[in-house]
Image: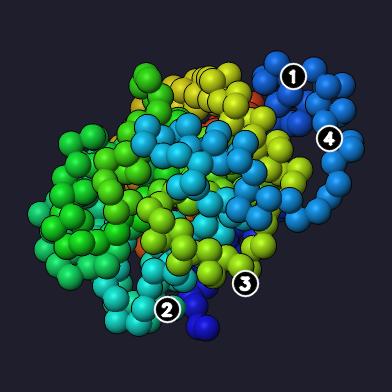
């Protein structure tokens, strides 16, 4: 199977360990097992008493009932039977396209996006018709354009809250996209891994799963729940999609790790305090970033409404890759070039890292920008 290079992953693999100040990270500052137990109010001895006698078999093939029940509780309309557990959202996305896409199918991804949503359908022989978000529309989709592109589509795919811009679809836009998809009988593949990190209360916005009957919702422990080390994600979808996915999943997953399943269950059952911690990090850090952007003559942006990333426009005579490479080399600050998302003149910054990393990274970026030619 031929597939394009995954630009962001290649960039991260190259630079992640070479930079001291990683502002390319998209996960909320990860928690330790110990901190998770504390947040969950669990006694560590009682937890160990459950863990130590665990026989490490394959465990529950589709995920334990406990875990799938905790995942279903993130949605108004889902039950455990609607949930399939996978190796991260990256595994979930991959399986969904493998299961849904035949050569010649039309897929309409809203871009820029997480590259899986364009490159995997393309590699499976789909006709990929991207809808390009525009900064002047606040990085929200032009719905008339979407209606036109979606004619005959099998799948509309989107990331909401959005990576890389941090935009958030208002509920009427979710319903309008559902209406466009419904008119075509199309699936909406909704990658919602940043759901739960809104800047405004209540903090968790609507899911496509609860607004459209042909939704395939993707979630994960990595971003909003700050537990990427679990490598655990999920698909919430109607039975026909789950059956199709399961046939492919048997070839590449079997099950997720039993320890990961247990820790994810603990985390989701404690989602109140865990999300409260994580929202306070993204809200406090975005306030710092916002103040920085206001003072930086070369930088402007559409302020993120949710998630962990901001897409900064810069005013300087160099490509985004040149800018990021020079900044990494000279100051040890890692950003992601907009070119990795097909958008020049921008860089992606992740603001959910520990505050001292963000603050020092921004100070160094200020010095770097000040030294660039006009
Ligand atoms: C939009 C989006 N989907 C999926 C993933 C993959 O996440 P996971 O760690 O759950 O595999 C990422 C990671 O950056 C992402 O940004």
- Answer above or below: position of 57 versus 108: above
| Marker disc for residue 124 | 2
**What is the C-alpha distance between the residues marked 2 and 4?**
41 Å
| Residue under the image location 76 percent in, 43 percent down | 259
Q: Are marks 3 and 2 in contact (CB under 8 Å)?
A: no
Residue at which label 3 appears: 251
Residue at which label 1 appears: 42
Residue at which label 4 appears: 51
Closer to us: mark 2 or mark 4? Answer: 4
Going from N to C along the chain, the mark reached first, 2 or 4, is 4
**What is the C-alpha distance between the residues marked 4 and 1?**
13 Å
Q: Position of residue 60 (x, y in %)?
A: 68, 50
| Residue under the image location 40 percent in, 28 percent down | 204
Q: Is residue 323 left or right of residue 173?
A: right
Q: Is residue 96 left or right of residue 327?
A: left
For label 1, count other residues whose C-alpha is less than 10 Å away and answer few (under 14), some (14-19) or many (20+).
some
Q: Are marks 3 and 4 in contact (CB under 8 Å)?
A: no
Going from N to C along the chain, the mark reached first, 3 or 1, is 1
- Answer above or below: position of 203 versus 51: above
Q: Are marks 2 and 4 in contact (CB under 8 Å)?
A: no
């Amino acid at each position: 199977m031929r597939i394009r290079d995954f630009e962001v992953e290649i960039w991260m693999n190259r630079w992640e360990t070479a930079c001291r100040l990683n502002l390319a990270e998209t996960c909320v500052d990860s928690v330790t097992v110990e901190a998770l137990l504390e947040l969950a109010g669990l006694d560590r001895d009682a937890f160990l008493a459950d863990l130590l006698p665990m026989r490490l078999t394959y465990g529950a093939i589709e995920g334990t009932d406990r875990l799938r029940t905790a995942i279903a509780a993130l949605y108004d309309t889902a039950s455990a039977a609607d949930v399939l557990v996978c190796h991260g959202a990256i595994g979930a996305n991959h399986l969904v396209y493998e299961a849904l896409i035949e050569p010649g199918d039309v897929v309409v991804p809203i871009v820029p996006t997480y590259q899986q949503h364009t490159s995997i359908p393309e590699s499976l022989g789909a006709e990929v018709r991207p809808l390009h978000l525009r900064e002047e529309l606040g990085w929200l989709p032009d719905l008339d354009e979407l209606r036109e592109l979606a004619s005959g589509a099998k799948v509309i795919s989107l990331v909401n809250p959005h990576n890389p811009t941090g935009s958030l679809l208002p509920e009427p836009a979710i319903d309008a996209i559902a209406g466009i998809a419904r008119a075509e009988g199309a699936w909406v593949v909704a990658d919602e891994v940043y759901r739960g990190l809104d800047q405004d209360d209540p903090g968790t916005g609507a899911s496509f799963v609860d607004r459209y009957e042909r939704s395939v919702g993707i979630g994960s422990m990595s971003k909003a729940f700050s537990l990427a080390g679990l490598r655990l994600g999920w698909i919430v979808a109607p039975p026909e999609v789950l059956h199709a996915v399961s046939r492919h999943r048997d070839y590449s997953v079997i099950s997720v790790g039993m320890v990961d399943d247990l820790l994810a269950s603990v985390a989701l059952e404690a989602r109140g305090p865990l999300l409260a911690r994580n929202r306070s990090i993204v809200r406090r850090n975005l306030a710092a970033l916002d103040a920085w952007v206001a003072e930086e003559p070369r930088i402007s942006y559409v302020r993120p409404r949710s998630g962990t990333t901001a897409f900064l426009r810069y005013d300087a005579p160099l490509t985004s890759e040149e800018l990021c490479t020079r900044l990494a080399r000279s100051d040890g600050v890692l950003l992601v070039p907009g070119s990795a998302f097909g958008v020049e003149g921008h860089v992606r910054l992740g603001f959910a890292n520990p505050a001292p990393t963000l603050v020092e990274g921004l100070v160094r970026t200020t010095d770097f920008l000040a030294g660039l030619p006009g």
